[in-house]
């Protein structure tokens, strides 16, 4: 698209079997970076898509890029669209007094309550968000890719930092929330100079 232009696109979300899914209540995020490998701290543009009425437009969400959003330096960028499926949100209960109840190591989640969550479709290649909670407020969160899934264990592709583990307070009860995030589209996002439009 050209610098300073406005664009409206419709995105349709499909599951692993190629079927359109109901995304009511879900979150769909469009992210642009200079390099695909850049950390989130270097995002140049990020927009939440508007989920359409799922009774009429199942699986569809609308991306609006305004004239302000597109005022980026003319170049090729990398984008991805990530879908967070709220129906596949898992909760693991942390009893009082235990600092790492289900973290058998910093790369492995293991608990009986994981089985129902895994049944919702978590698989290798998905990303998950772990958020420690206390009194309804998030204390800390991290995002990791899933490497291996068995009946009651999720193995992460890289270790969770000590800062996340230290966010657990031994004086209270907590939950660990896990959300399934799937990258549904990715590719080049090009901004062209409007000098060459005419």
Image: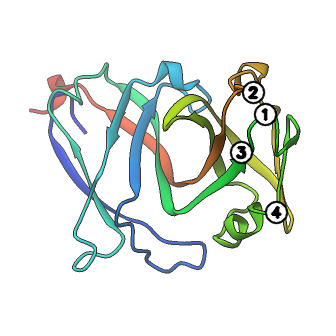
Looking at marks 1 and 3 on the same chain, the residue that comes earlier in the sequence is marked by 1
Most foreground residue, 186 or 168: 168
Examine the rendered structure and indicate whether residue 29 appears above or below residue 74.
below
- The residue shown at (49%, 80%) is 19
Residue 196 drawn at (x, y percent)? 18, 28
The kind of secondary structure element at disc 2 is loop
Front label number (4 vs 2): 2
Q: Residue at x 42, y 31 (%)?
A: 76
Marks 1 & 4, CB-CB < 8 Å contact:
no
Horizontal side of residue 83 vs 149, given as left or right: left
**Nearest to N terminus: mark 4 or mark 2:** 4
Circle nearer the N terminus (3, 2): 3
- When asked about the image quadrant of residue 32, the answer is top left
Q: Point out residue 8 in the picture as x, y percentages from the top left corner.
A: 19, 51
Using the numbered discs, state the Cα–Cα distance from disc 1 to disc 4 in whole angstroms. 19 Å
Sequence-wise, the earlier of marks 1 and 4 is: 1
Q: Residue reaching furthest left?
A: 198
Dot 1 falls on a residue whose secondary structure is loop
For residue 137, the mark is none
Q: Which residue is mark 1?
A: 97
């Amino acid at each position: 698209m050209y610098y300073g232009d406005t664009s409206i696109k419709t995105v349709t979300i499909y599951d692993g079997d190629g079927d359109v899914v109901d995304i009511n209540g879900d979150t769909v995020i469009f992210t642009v970076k200079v390099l695909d490998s850049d950390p989130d701290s270097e995002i140049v543009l990020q927009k939440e898509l508007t989920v359409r009425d799922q009774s009429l437009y199942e699986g569809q969400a609308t991306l609006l890029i305004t004239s302000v959003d597109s005022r980026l330096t003319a170049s090729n960028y990398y984008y991805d669209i990530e879908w967070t499926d709220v129906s596949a949100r898992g909760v693991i209960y942390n009893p009082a007094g235990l600092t790492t109840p289900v973290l058998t190591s910093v790369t492995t989640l293991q608990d009986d309550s994981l089985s129902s969550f895994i049944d919702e479709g978590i698989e290798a290649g998905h990303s998950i968000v772990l958020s420690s909670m206390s009194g309804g407020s998030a204390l800390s969160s991290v995002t990791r890719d899933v490497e291996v899934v068995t009946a009651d264990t999720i193995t992460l592709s890289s270790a969770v930092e000590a800062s996340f583990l230290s966010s657990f307070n031994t004086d209270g009860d907590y939950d660990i929330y896990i959300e399934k995030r799937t990258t549904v589209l990715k590719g080049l996002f090009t901004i062209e100079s409007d000098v060459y439009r005419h």
